[in-house]
Image (cartoon, coloured by chain):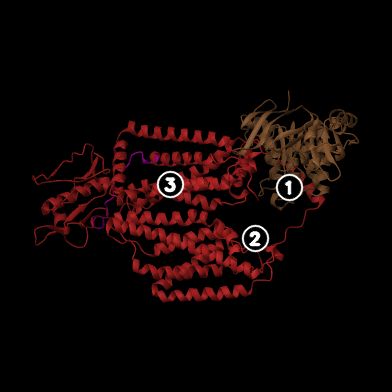
Chain colours: A brown, B red
Amino acid sequence: MKVVEFVNIHRAYKKGFDVLKGVTFSIEPGEVVGLLGKNGAGKTTLIRIAMGMLEAQQGEVRIFGMDPREKPIEVKRRIGYVSEDQILPPFLRVGEVIDMHRGLFPDWDNDMALRLSERFGLSPRERIRSLSKGQARQVALLCAVSHKPELLLLDEPAGGLDPAARREFLETSIQLLNEAGSTILFSSHHLTDVERMAGRVVMIHEGSILVDSDMDALHEDYTLALIPRVNGATTKKIIAHEDCLSVRERSDAMHAVFRLDPSRTAAVLERDLGVTGVNCRNVALEDMFIELVEGQE
Amino acid sequence: MLNLLKQNPMIRTLPRWLAVSAVPVALIVNLNMGIALGYKQTFDPLVMLAAVWLSFTIFLVFGEVTRCTPFEMALPIPARRLWLAHITSTVISALAILVVTVGLVAGGVWLLWRLSGRLMLPVDEMGGLTAHVCAGLFLAIAFLQNPLPPLHRLPRSGVRVVLVMAVTLALVVLLSKIGTWTALIPLLLAAAVGLRRYQSVPRVFTLFTADAGGAKPASRDEITAGWKAHAAASTPRGAVFARLLHRTIFRCFYVGGKRKFSPWLTFPFIVLFGALLSVVDTLWFEDSQRFLYVPMAVYVLISFTAQPLGALYLVDSLPISRRRVWNVLVIPYVAALLAGYGLGMAVVALRADTAGKGEVIHFLQGKSDGNTYLYVPASAMKIAWDSEVPKTTSPWGETHEAWSRPLHRWSRVRLYSPYHTPPGSSLEFVAWQISRAVEAVYGEALNLDEIASRYLETRADGSVGLRGERLTIQKDNPHLRRIPHGGPVFPFLMGSVFVLWMLASIVYMQTLRAGVTKRTQALVMWALMAAMLLWWFVPFVLAVTHVADPEIVTGFLVIVFGRIGASAWATLLVWGAAIALSAAAYAFASGRFVRVEVVREEV
């Protein structure tokens, strides 16, 4: 059974302005999926729909085969959730937050919670409102993982944290993932983090999926082609090609992303568009992201 | 300066506080003025002073009163200018509360004057009193600036604010008794204290004073020991866990979100309305007036329910049933309402010596024709369902028309007073009618000869007049107690309040979804509250337009409920209907709440 299933999800906040425009993808057990996109692309909306906090106006969402709006308790008990803007009750002490969570989650692992508390240096007497941003996020992570969730939803979990805190946070998440074998869907602007953690990437742009690919395939089977202007090729002609995902004018050349490996891209460009002297190469995720997103605009 | 004022949290939240404090307080004063008018009583002008003071105290204790925000501290603006902006905002807020409270009370006085020709408050004294109120408010504002001048927020505690407000109120009351010119005393004192505070404003405000630093961070050993102790404690289960969970949800609603909405403010109000819906009014007036409090109770409940929902995001990612969360929001208010009702009943029971002892039977000169008539409470009248009002015939055959009034202008149902004494009534007939009225109201007849000799006389023109200033039945017969009207009023009132509250909440919940702006949410909430306020005004409007007399309508309700109370089946039916409708409204609202989308408020 699939852990997460989004089928043709639509969601608008204002009439006529769809944030999600027919998003469809699913996640298998044990997968670690990075959700990428610019601000306002719809990542948070999608994760909140998975949590049942928002309702899809069209389409179907299934978490563990259940509708999170119909069976919120059953779904949330099996999910760990951390988001950038998630706030724990500020008036509670860390110990009280943990007490509340261990009462709410039947599979709560007290040893893991204790281990993490000591690792993070959190005192049970400390009030949430007196913690730093990073410490508060650590408490949220502790609460999200200590009940050994089958699915971990992380929405910009390390946003706003300094590099050391971010590293600590991610290392802990990865370690826990290895221990529990959880499925993870996480969104982040830190593409190096995504590269390190995710086995698969789903890139959303303006409410639609631009790329849904394994990380390895993304590195090997997607090509950035730098096309000189001397060949008479235009952006219109290039983007019209079935394997072209994006193209944009730059000062040095036209930058196009193709869903092909570099050698095939060069051959296809020469055969179909009569373009020669193209510099084709695999690129890192961050460059790919920028090319794809900017090329769409 | 104008920008600073526009951005000031006090000014920005002022409309909300006017609606929560000044409007209800003024309307309660108006309502009680209306009730007092019905009982031929007048009001002390100091009531208005108390109303303004109460509204402003609520604002100071719970409102967003701060010297400047951390954002403003980061801007290149001199601290003194920030301080002046803060003082100006506080003064504007105080004046707004004064204007709204006095305006609404003045409106009520005018309405009642139009209706009855009687001024409930002496208008000529109002100018002087307003000057005293202004001066007193300025003095209180100046005094509240005293502690910790360098701190960016006002280090105020509820106790301190109440103390300062109480002292200034006492001063203003004292000075207002001497003369209008004495308003200069608190005004000059406020100017002196204010000037001194202005001089003590530092170059820059500080976020924390030196003595307000945080505690020393715990060492690794302390943390380990803390966790060991924590782990040794048993996992909260059953009732202990439920208490922790419910307490946490409750606190999230009121003190967890960006906008704190202290239960210390909300719950006393609900208890008060519970008491007003009970028979507590019989201490002064008559219990038929409690029907008029229904829209106000709903108004307060709507405003108090909508606000905490903004903090729902704090618990929404947890596997907690929405119905449980809804229960935590609703049940405490229901409990407070019931507690208030019980408290009202208890107060009346404890004050049995004074409860129901106001004079309610009057023998007064009519406004229009100068004749003297016998007035009884509408609840002591009788109903003519087919508009056929029977004449009243005494045992010796003297017959007169009964006074009657339709339920509303177009109704065939009339309420009539069989105790009417129209012109031409003999002295014996008037005495007999007074005796019957006393029996109807108190359940005990008085001796006719005694009534005639003690209270009545025949005037030179042959008409019957009052010996002395007024009829003093209760005063002369202190053992008399008004007969309680009975009937299932409790389920009717509580059911009405609850069902209307739930329906209004359902309407508001339609706006709780992502994409609906805060402005739209606020507009819907204000519209709902305005609807309740307008409804509250309906009795006044009906009276002014002569469509219906509120006293007749409430009297009719009391009589009908009294009759229902006489039948066990009818009583059960009312209880059953109230419970069924309340349960249905609750289930419907709870179902809507499950679908609400939570959008986190900006922090």
Q: CA distance from mark 1 to mark 3?
A: 43 Å
Q: Residues within 10 Å of mark 2 (few under 14, many from 20)?
A: some
Q: Residues within 10 Å of mark 1 (few under 14, many from 20)?
A: many
Quadrant where the N terminus of chain A is found in the figure: top right
The amino acid type of the residue labelled 3 equals Met
The amino acid type of the residue labelled 2 equals Thr
Label drawn at residue A64? none
- Residue toward you, B266 or A282: A282
- Residue toward you, B73 or B5: B5
* In front: label 2 or label 1: 2
User: Which residue is drawn at the image coordinates 39% and 75% (left, top)?
Assistant: B179
Q: Residue at label 2? A: B69
User: Which residue is drawn at the image coordinates 58% and 37% (left, top)?
Assistant: B596
Q: CA distance from mark 3 to mark 2?
A: 35 Å
Which element is circle 3 on? Answer: helix
Quadrant where the C terminus of chain A is found in the figure: top right
- Badge 3 and badge 2 both on one subunit: yes
Q: Residue B274, can we see it? A: no
Q: Residue at label 1? A: A136
- Would you say the magenta stretch is mainly helix, strand or loop? loop
Q: Chain of mark 2?
A: B
User: Which residue is drawn at the image coordinates 30% and 40% (left, top)?
Assistant: B562
**Lateral position of residue B322 relative to residue B431, left or right:** right
Q: Position of residue B578 (x, y in %)?
A: 41, 35
Q: Residue at label 3? A: B532
The amino acid type of the residue labelled 1 equals Ala
Which element is circle 1 on? Answer: helix
Q: Position of residue B558 (x, y in %)?
A: 31, 43
Range drawn in magenta: B474-490
